[in-house]
Amino acid sequence: MSTILIVEDEKSIVDLISYNLKREGYDIMEAYDGQKGLELALSGSVDLVLLDVMLPVMDGFEVLRHIREQSALPVIMVTAREEERDKVLGLEEGADDYITKPFSVKELAARVKANIRRNTDFNKTIHEGDKYGPFDVDRSLQAISKDGKLLDLTQREYDIICYFLERPSQVISREELMEKVWGFEFYGDLRAVDVAMRRLRAKLEDDPAEPKYLMTKRGAGYYLQV
């Protein structure tokens, strides 16, 4: 059974989310400020974090930055803000997903289910010790190294690379990546894919401005060249 950490300062929202996710079979942990949320997130007892942006003591972006310094734990940002810059900032800081208040319980449950999945169907065909050009995959650790150096990847980034590795040199559209890697329809918002590709390219390439591996096919999508 998976454990979801809800970091939110409005008790009514915590109660609503907690009630509905418990009905889905999840265990729930709660934190009402950023500092406590960070402590629980890094406790090793959590499988996914629902993280509000506006929090006392420490805001959600700062909490996310600290989490990403130590963990690839899946994080969904939950915010009442609708500004483009806030959504993009969360993704650039390493959030796996975001959802904007007010949200439907059904949508939230779908995103939690998709993000908490650790072993997707496409990962099951990647075997420990497999080598793809300069990349080595250790499925038991869900880790990937390049030229013997371990890559500091989030769970989402690991899933993306595995999806590409099973389809070498195949151009994959943003829509396909959203559906197959994120695991559900993202309501037409494909910015998460573009931000994830930028972050991933910075980790894979010696010079992201002149990529050798994660390539863009203008107007079509992305492909991994190994």
Image (tube, rainbow, N blue to C red):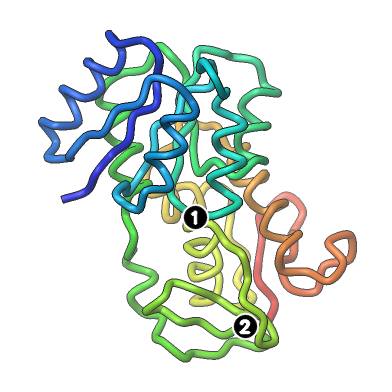
In this view, the residue in front, 167 or 49, is 49
- Residue 27, position in %: x, y? 17, 39
- Residue 59, position in %: x, y? 57, 23
Q: Amino acid at mark 2?
A: Phe
Q: Quadrant of the C terminus?
A: bottom right
Q: Going by the image, does 12 lie left or right of 19?
A: right
Q: Amino acid at mark 1?
A: Ala
Per the image, label 1 sits on a secondary structure element best described as: loop
Locate residue 140: give its quadrant: bottom left
Locate residue 24: give its quadrant: top left
Determine crowd level at label 1: few under 14, some 14-19, many 20+ residues with C-alpha closer than 10 A: some
Residue at (39% x, 26% y) in the render: 7
Question: Which mark, residue 135?
Answer: 2
Look at mark 1 in the image and give the residue it sits on.
72
- Residue 127, position in %: x, y? 39, 85
Locate residue 157: give its quadrant: bottom right
Residue at (60% x, 30% y) in the render: 61
Question: Which mark, residue 209?
Answer: none
